[in-house]
Image (spheres, rainbow, N blue to C red):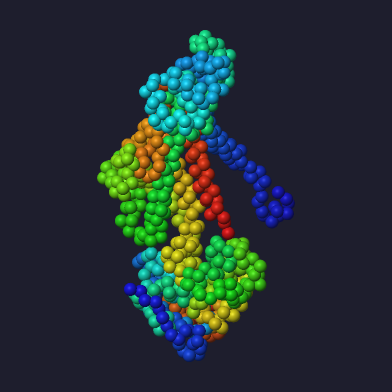
């Protein structure tokens, strides 16, 4: 304190500034660590999950063929180098006449390529079977032990490193044998169902949100509707499945099976179709979409509406030209959430009647279908070890599909988010 | 059924001295729910003149202004009684289309609120939704010139309107309003968010526009009212918090020789 200040009667205590500082810094530090810990726990849990999946999707397998391919060599030429005709002969020699005839009926051998016949030989004659499989961690860390174990326990078996997630896995339809199973039908089923879900839910959801935010008066009835929409977002998905079963599969069967339009799939001709599943999931994500779209519309500043209305624009012109474009990024964020939710749903689709085993690709809204989560669910409940590996591979496919659909929505959002 | 408001002759052709009022509030009362915000207001707005509405905060100046083009209706609880005559026609008749009222009685707001679009789009949009048949480029240029903004933006018409300064944005909002050829422009404290230089530009612009348009302006700034307006209405809040007109007359008279002592107290800065 300077003497001039004292002379003026001013109090000025320098020491007082730091009084609360150490305590405040301590509290701030504790909170910082708590928040960091929460983030770390989240990241760790997600990493463990991903590790678990990847761990099962790759690894060593011991493969034992029912018929040793070496015994199938013709005149010293190994099986994989045989010509198509020779392969057909091999096939004829090892399978029953009835099966041979059936294969010929499905598609004459003359029309089949060499590769197809070779695959048939592997599938029907050689029949390589995975007798034992190991996780990725084991394969990397215990390679020698595994080699010794295979040599001891499975004489004649070969040890190979297998990626369960292969291009063939994506291309092949379902099969009862894990080695030959693929996810093509499930991917197509998922895409069909999601397409219908979004086509139905997006316009309905945005329309309802626009009505509730821009047009509806604040009456007790509208408040009741709004409260109920919020509650519907929390209803368990299986309930929606039962609703879908009652309404879309049973009551609206002529529509959902396509018989009304004369488009019914001859193999099903009942309501357990892509359309029923899509409509059920649309109901499921509708509350989510409405809530998000309402938030987005509410976030558009009122001054923008006033500006348009003061120019003599109608309410609809205001909404269409100014409110919706401004709200679109937020609405699309909600759509991303809705897609993610619908893509991962299993329970309601089981109730609605997804096929558990299907080898025919879905070809339209009236086809029977299966989806990736259902496929995964099926495979994980199988007792054989091998199915666990293809389930893990299918989970990776599901994640990739989810990410690419979300990426598409995010790209779309960023396109519209171009701020002026 | 709503019928489009149609009035002949066009107001622009009416001379200021004709004694005809463009807008006239008669015993106008505005409620927000149960709260009476404006009590029995009588006010006449003369063609091609600037009418200023002044008064302390909360006395209902903006409410009165918004009653002139039915913008109050956007507030769900608002209710209007009495009449607002636009060239003799009550715009609160049930058959009058509020959309048409707002096209013919435009509004500029306190805070510049350009659309988040290009400068060109801001001006062209209003004309486009009203089915403008002429050359849009010409209309945009003419409107921007009238708003004294053309020289500043002519090279960046297709850039964002939000990149402009506050004063430029406000002039763009004025350009946007005159692009739909209204007959009256209502301005709600158009310069209160601007710096003194931008304010002066807006005031010059108002004088310029008054040759063609009827302007009603709400302002907090008494110097501004004295500088730009031809007529001034002084509003106050009564004991019941309802706004009412204390005094209305030519601006010169209100500021130099007010009849009501409350007006004198206010303009000399003794309250408000």
- Where in the figure is residue B269, as x and y percent of width and height? 55, 74
- Where in the figure is residue A256, as x and y percent of width and height? 32, 45
Picture residue at 41% right of the left edge, 28% below the top: A104
Residue ranking furthest to the top: A152
Picture residue at 62% right of the left edge, 72% below the top: B149
Q: Is residue B98 left or right of residue B51?
A: left
- Where in the figure is residue A112, as x and y percent of width and height? 48, 31
The foreground one among B52 and A56 is: A56
- Whether residue B147 is visible: no
The foreground one among B45 and A413 is: A413
Residue ranking furthest to the right: A3
- For the C terminus of chain A, the image quarter is bottom right
Instruction: Examine the rendered structure and indicate whether residue A262 appears above or below residue B238.
Output: above
Picture residue at 51% right of the left edge, 26% below the top: A84
- Where in the figure is residue A188, as x and y percent of width and height? 44, 39
- Image quadrant in which you'd find residue B237: bottom left
Instruction: Examine the rendered structure and indicate whether residue A211 appears above or below residue B126.
Output: above
């Amino acid at each position: 304190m300077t003497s001039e200040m004292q002379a003026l009667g001013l109090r000025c205590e320098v020491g007082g500034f730091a009084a609360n500082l150490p305590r405040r810094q301590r509290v701030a530090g504790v909170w910082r660590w708590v928040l960091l810990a929460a983030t770390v726990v989240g990241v760790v849990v997600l990493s463990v999950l991903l590790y678990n999946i990847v761990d099962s999707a790759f690894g060593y397998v011991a493969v034992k063929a029912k018929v040793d391919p070496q015994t199938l060599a013709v005149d010293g030429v190994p099986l994989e180098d045989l010509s198509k005709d020779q392969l057909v002969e091999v096939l004829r020699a090892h399978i029953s006449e009835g099966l041979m005839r059936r294969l010929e009926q499905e598609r004459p051998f003359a029309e089949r390529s060499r590769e197809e016949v070779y695959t048939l030989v592997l599938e029907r004659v050689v029949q390589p079977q995975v007798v034992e499989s190991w996780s990725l961690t084991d394969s990397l860390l215990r390679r020698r032990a595994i080699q010794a174990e295979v040599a001891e326990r499975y004489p004649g078996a070969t040890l190979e490193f297998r990626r369960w997630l292969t291009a063939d896995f994506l291309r092949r339809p379902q099969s009862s044998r894990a080695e030959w199973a693929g996810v093509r039908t499930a991917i197509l089923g998922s895409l069909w169902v999601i397409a219908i879900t979004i086509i139905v839910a997006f316009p309905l959801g945005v329309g309802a949100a626009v009505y509730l935010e821009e047009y509806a008066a604040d009456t007790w009835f509208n408040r009741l509707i709004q409260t109920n929409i919020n509650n519907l977002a929390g209803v368990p998905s299986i309930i929606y499945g039962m609703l879908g079963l009652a309404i879309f599969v049973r009551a609206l069967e002529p529509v959902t099976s396509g018989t009304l339009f004369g488009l019914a799939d001859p193999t099903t001709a009942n309501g357990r179709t892509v359309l029923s599943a899509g409509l059920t999931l649309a109901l499921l994500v509708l509350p989510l979409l409405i809530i998000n779209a309402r938030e987005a519309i509410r976030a558009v500043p009122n001054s923008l509406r006033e500006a348009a209305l003061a120019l003599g624009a109608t309410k609809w012109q205001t909404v269409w030209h100014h409110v919706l474009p401004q709200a679109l990024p937020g609405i699309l964020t909600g759509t991303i959430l809705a897609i993610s939710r619908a893509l991962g749903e299993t329970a309601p689709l089981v109730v609605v009647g997804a096929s558990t085993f299907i080898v025919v690709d879905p070809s339209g809204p009236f086809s029977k279908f299966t989806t990736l989560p259902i496929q995964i669910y099926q495979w994980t409940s199988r007792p054989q070890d091998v199915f666990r590996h293809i389930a893990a591979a299918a989970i990776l496919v599901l994640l990739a599909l989810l990410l690419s659909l979300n990426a598409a929505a995010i790209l779309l959002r960023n396109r519209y988010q171009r701020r002026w | 059924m709503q019928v489009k408001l149609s009035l002949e002759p066009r107001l622009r052709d009416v001379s200021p001295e004709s004694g005809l009022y463009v807008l006239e509030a008669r015993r106008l009362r505005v409620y927000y729910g149960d709260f009476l915000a404006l009590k029995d207001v009588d006010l006449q707005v003369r063609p091609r003149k600037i009418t200023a509405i002044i008064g302390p905060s909360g006395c209902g100046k903006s409410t009165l202004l918004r009653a002139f083009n039915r913008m109050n209706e956007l507030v769900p609880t608002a209710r209007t009684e009495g009449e607002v005559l636009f060239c003799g026609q009550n715009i609160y008749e049930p058959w009058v289309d509020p959309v048409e009222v707002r096209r013919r009685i435009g509004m500029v707001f306190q805070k510049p609120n350009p659309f988040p679009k290009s400068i060109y789009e801001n001006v062209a949009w209003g004309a486009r939704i009203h089915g403008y048949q002429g050359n849009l480029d010409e209309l945009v240029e003419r409107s921007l010139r009238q708003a004294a903004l053309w020289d500043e933006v002519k090279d960046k018409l297709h850039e964002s309107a939000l990149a402009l300064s506050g004063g430029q944005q406000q002039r763009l909002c004025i350009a946007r309003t005159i692009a739909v050829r209204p007959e009256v422009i209502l301005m709600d404290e158009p310069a209160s968010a601007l710096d003194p230089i931008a304010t002066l530009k807006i005031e010059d612009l108002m004088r310029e526009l008054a040759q063609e348009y009827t302007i009603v302006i709400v302002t907090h700034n008494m110097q501004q009212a004295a500088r730009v307006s031809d007529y001034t209405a002084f509003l106050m809040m009564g004991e019941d918090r309802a706004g009412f007109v204390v005094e209305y007359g030519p601006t010169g008279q209100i500021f130099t020789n007010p009849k009501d002592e409350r007006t004198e107290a206010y303009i000399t800065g003794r309250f408000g």
